[in-house]
Image (spheres, rainbow, N blue to C red):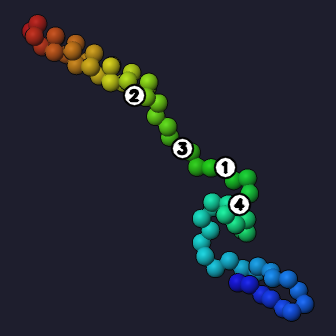
Amino acid sequence: MLVTSMQDEVRTIAQHYRDRGDSENNFLEPIGKPAPPVIQYSPSGMVRVANAALTLGTLWLKARSIN
């Protein structure tokens, strides 16, 4: 809501929409609030998991063929 008068400048006194927290406007936004955690997957970690799964699968197949 904007309130104006002929003698003073325009002032913001209330915000009637939900704040997105994108720092587009600084009114009522939390300052210094930590960002939510972001989970990042590294390709090398995913490759290690895939290699481990292949190794276990190979060992399992070899164990089955022995019996």
First in sequence: mark 3 or mark 2? 3
User: Residue 22, percent across and down?
Assistant: 63, 60
Q: Mark 2 — residue?
A: 46
Amino acid, disc 3: Val
Local SS, label 2:
helix
Q: Which label sits on residue 20?
A: none
Local SS, label 1:
loop
User: Residue 27, percent across and down?
Assistant: 73, 69
Q: Mark 1 — residue?
A: 34
Mark 4 crowdedness (10 Å alpha carbons): few <14, some 14-19, many ≥20: few
Question: Would you identify the image quadrant in which residue 8 lies?
Answer: bottom right
Local SS, label 4:
loop
Amino acid, disc 1: Pro
Q: Is residue 32 left or right of residue 47?
A: right
Local SS, label 3:
loop
Q: Mark 4 — residue?
A: 30
Mark 2 crowdedness (10 Å alpha carbons): few <14, some 14-19, many ≥20: few
Q: Mark 3 — residue?
A: 38
Q: Residue at x 29, y 22 (%)?
A: 53
Amino acid, disc 4: Pro
Q: Residue furthest front?
A: 6
Q: Nearer the viewer, mark 1 or mark 2?
A: 2
Q: Is residue 64 above or below residue 10?
A: above
